[in-house]
């Protein structure tokens, strides 16, 4: 069961990343990010919200090692931490921030707890 849930988490990571990678304008609008007079924001969406997650998810599946899945959990823990700090300091739309942060937190807890307890 752990293996199946790990694979689902990695595939979700790839899926989330594909939104930023293939539809950066839509992703930016969904995250309430506004364009400026440059397309650099689209480049950033494709890189940090897109390609980074797509390649990380693919690498985790390719490595297929408990520590790789645990490190994916650490990535999600960092995202959740940033999201919750933003709730405290930035006053973002609460429902949206808590939804995204909650998904990130659940993935972080699962991936770290389930995979750090496995032998290498």
Image (spheres, rainbow, N blue to C red):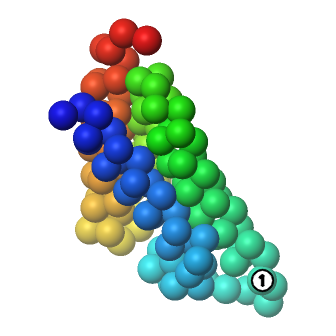
The quadrant in which the C terminus is found is top left
Q: Secondary structure at mark 1?
A: loop
On screen, 88 above or below 108?
below
Q: Which residue: 77% across, 83% down? A: 39
Give coordinates of residue 72: x percent, y percent: 47, 37
Residue indicated by mark 1 = 39
Does residue 56 appear anywhere in the picture? yes
Q: Residue furthest top?
A: 119
Give coordinates of residue 110: x percent, y percent: 28, 34
Crowdedness of circle 1 by 10 Å Cα count: few (<14), some, many (20+)?
Answer: few
Horizontal relation, residue 98 to residue 58: left or right: left
Q: Picture quarter containing residue 69?
A: top left
Q: Which residue: 29% across, 58% down? A: 98
Horizontal relation, residue 88 to residue 49: left or right: left
Give coordinates of residue 112: x percent, y percent: 36, 27
Does residue 28 appear anywhere in the picture? no
On screen, 102 above or below 75?
below
Q: Residue furthest left?
A: 1
Q: Nearer the viewer, residue 17 or 99?
A: 17
Give coordinates of residue 46: x percent, y percent: 66, 69
Q: Which residue: 45% across, 79% down? A: 30
On screen, 112 above or below 5?
above
Horizontal relation, residue 37 to residue 56: left or right: right
Q: Nearer the viewer, residue 40 or 37?
A: 40
Horizontal relation, residue 17 to residue 43: left or right: left
Q: Picture quarter containing residue 76?
A: top left
Q: Nearer the viewer, residue 29 or 75?
A: 75
Q: Which residue: 59% across, 85% down? A: 25
């Amino acid at each position: 069961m752990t293996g199946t849930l790990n694979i689902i988490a990695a595939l979700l990571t790839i899926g989330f990343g594909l939104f930023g990678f293939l539809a950066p304008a839509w992703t930016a609008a969904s995250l309430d990010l506004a364009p400026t007079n440059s397309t650099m924001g689209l480049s950033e969406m494709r890189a940090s919200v897109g390609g980074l997650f797509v390649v990380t998810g693919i690498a985790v599946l390719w490595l297929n090692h408990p520590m790789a899945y645990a490190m994916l959990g650490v990535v999600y823990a960092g995202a959740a931490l940033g999201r919750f700090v933003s709730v405290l300091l930035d006053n973002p739309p609460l429902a949206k921030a808590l939804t995204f942060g909650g998904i990130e937190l659940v993935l972080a807890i699962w991936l770290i707890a389930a995979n750090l307890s496995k032998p290498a």
